[in-house]
Image (tube, rainbow, N blue to C red):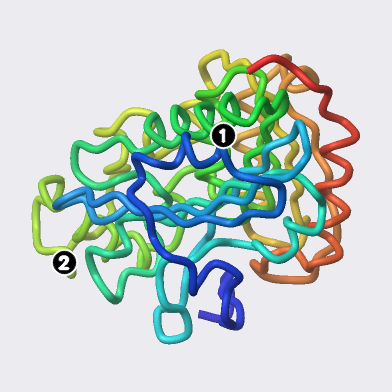
Amino acid sequence: MSDSDYGTARKGAYDDLPVHPASQLTRTARLSRPGERSRFRQKLGQEGGLDSAFIRQDSETLIVTFHGALDRTKYTIPRFERARQTEQLGTSCLYWADPSLWLDEKLALSWFTGAGSLDLFELLADRSVAVAEAIGANRVIFTGSSGGGFASLQVSARVPHSAALVFNPQTTVFHYWQSVQRPYIRVCFPNLLPVPAEDFDFSYDWTEALGDRLSAVRRYAKPTENTVHYWTNTHDWHHKKHFQPFKRVLGGSASETLTVHPYDGGKGHHPPSSERFAEALQTCLDETSSFPI
């Protein structure tokens, strides 16, 4: 897919670290020294395996990242998004990797929704807050682009006073490519398939059966206590298909919840450049005041 958030694989800063049980995440975060990195994993049975990575810094801010679609011929999993770049800011960072990708070696994107009955967003919100509390952080920023932006919107909505910094996210799974939805529903929600996945015609919004879990538009139609810093490339088809419905659902409260940063990122769906990401993150830090978690 040329119209994607795929990138070039390279060795990550966390790849060679020992992997600890996820039950140790909060305690390790509390006891770790500035600059110390660590990795964790939790087996989720039929729902895959939840991987995370963490670095403690002398900072009152915790940045939490989510990756987008992965070209499985280039990337090995787990993938910790923008670890090298975010570390340069001097904030503590928590990186999540999507557990559903362990369920099928060809699955490229599953939006951190969790598979089957596992609503992963609640779990990720609770654990991110636990880490923030363990290190005394008074500001939490969830960030990601495309599919990672969708996860950031969903998890931030469950953490009062947090911020979501997103770049051209999907705001509802059903409005993304059917070629990506098809393997996703086959792997993660086979019970919702009335026919074999290859024959599914998407004649209706199948995600409605899961409420707001697969739609940030439906999620933000209800009041939330977070803020959203939304960077939208006006030449990306996501601007019309995903950003505009999201903005409409916020209605008159948009000025309180939503800060919009339109930009010219060229035609197509691409991740932000390193320079754009750094600019946006610094802007978000400047615009987001500290608060008690």
Say which quadrant the C terminus sits in.
top right
**Few, some or many C-alpha atoms within 10 Å of disc 1 (few <14, some 14-19, many ≥20)?**
some
Residue 213 vs residue 19, the one in the foreground: 19
Q: Is residue 197 above or below residue 149?
A: below
Q: Which residue is mark 1?
A: 30
Q: Residue type at mark 2?
A: Asp
Q: Residue at x 41, y 53 (%)?
A: 40
Q: Position of residue 29 (x, y in %)?
A: 55, 39
The numbered mark, 2 or 1, whose residue comes first in the sequence reads: 1
Q: Position of residue 235 (x, y in %)?
A: 76, 62
Residue at image point 61% right, 70% down? 13
Residue, x 83% and y 23% (percent of image)?
289
User: In this rendering, does residue 207 appear at all?
Assistant: yes
Whether residue 189 is visible, yes or no, is no
As drawn, the label of residue 199 is 2
Q: Secondary structure at mark 1?
A: helix
Nearer-the-camera pick, 227 or 10: 10
Mark 2 is surrounded, within 10 Å at the Cα level, by few (under 14), some (14 to 19) or many (20 or more) other residues, namely few
Q: Farthest residue toward the bottom? A: 73
